[in-house]
């Protein structure tokens, strides 16, 4: 009798564990929007990028001949709320300062820093 109860409890525990996986409250987001990506074709030292207002900073280490796919390695990509942002970037000698706008549901805004 004890074996029967133990098997029943074990089967019920397994069933409940599988059923709890069916209703996920946190779906995986596959369509990432509101991104900005900084890239460069400059063959100098790495470029440090700062989005003003404490909205992020990063470094560009890749050299691209044209705008790469958003989020590609060696470029600086950031997800931001819709709005207009100023940025500054420097490699030690060259300096870039400008602004960009993220619109609602923008897939990816690319900003090329070239010499």
Image (cartoon, rainbow, N blue to C red):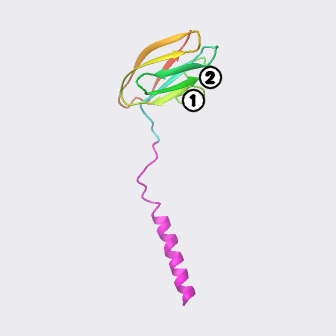
Residue 5 picture location, percent across and down: 52, 84
Q: Quadrant of residue 46?
A: top right
Number of disc labels: 2
Q: Earlier in the sequence, mark 1 or mark 2?
A: 2
Residue under numbered circle 2 = 62
Task: Look at the picture and state if 62 lies above or below 7.
Answer: above
Task: Look at the picture and state if 20 lies above or below 62.
Answer: below
Specify the farthest residue to the bottom. Answer: 1
Q: Does residue 33 belong to the magenta stretch?
A: no
Residue 13 picture location, percent across and down: 50, 72
- Rendered image: mark on residue 26: none
Look at the numbered discs 1 and 2 and tell me whether their residues touch, using CB distance below 8 Å.
Answer: yes
Crowding at dot 2, Cα within 10 Å, few <14 / some 14-19 / many 20+, comes out as: some
Residue 100 picture location, percent across and down: 41, 19
Magenta span of residues: 1-29
Task: Look at the picture and state if 64 lies above or below 10.
Answer: above
The C terminus: image quadrant: top right
Q: Secondary structure at mark 1?
A: loop
Left of 72 or right of it: where is 16? left
Crowding at dot 1, Cα within 10 Å, few <14 / some 14-19 / many 20+, comes out as: few
Q: Quadrant of residue 48?
A: top right
Q: Secondary structure at mark 2?
A: loop
Q: Does residue 20 belong to the magenta stretch?
A: yes
The rendered magenta stretch, by its main secondary structure, is classed as helix
At 43% from the left and 49% from the top, the residue drawn is 27
- Rendered image: mark on residue 72: 1
At 40% from the left and 24% from the top, the residue drawn is 53
The residues tagged by marks 1 and 2 sit, at their Cα atoms, a distance apart of: 9 Å
């Amino acid at each position: 009798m004890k074996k029967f109860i133990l098997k029943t409890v074990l089967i019920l525990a397994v069933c409940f564990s599988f059923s709890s996986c069916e209703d996920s409250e946190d779906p995986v987001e596959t369509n990432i929007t509101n991104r900005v990506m900084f890239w460069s074709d400059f063959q100098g030292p790495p470029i440090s990028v700062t989005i003003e207002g404490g909205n992020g900073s990063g470094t560009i280490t890749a050299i691209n001949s044209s705008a790469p796919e958003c989020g590609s390695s060696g470029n600086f990509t950031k997800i931001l709320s819709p709005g207009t942002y100023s940025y500054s970037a420097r490699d030690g000698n060259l300096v870039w300062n400008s602004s960009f706008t993220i619109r609602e549901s923008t897939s990816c805004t690319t900003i090329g820093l070239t010499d």
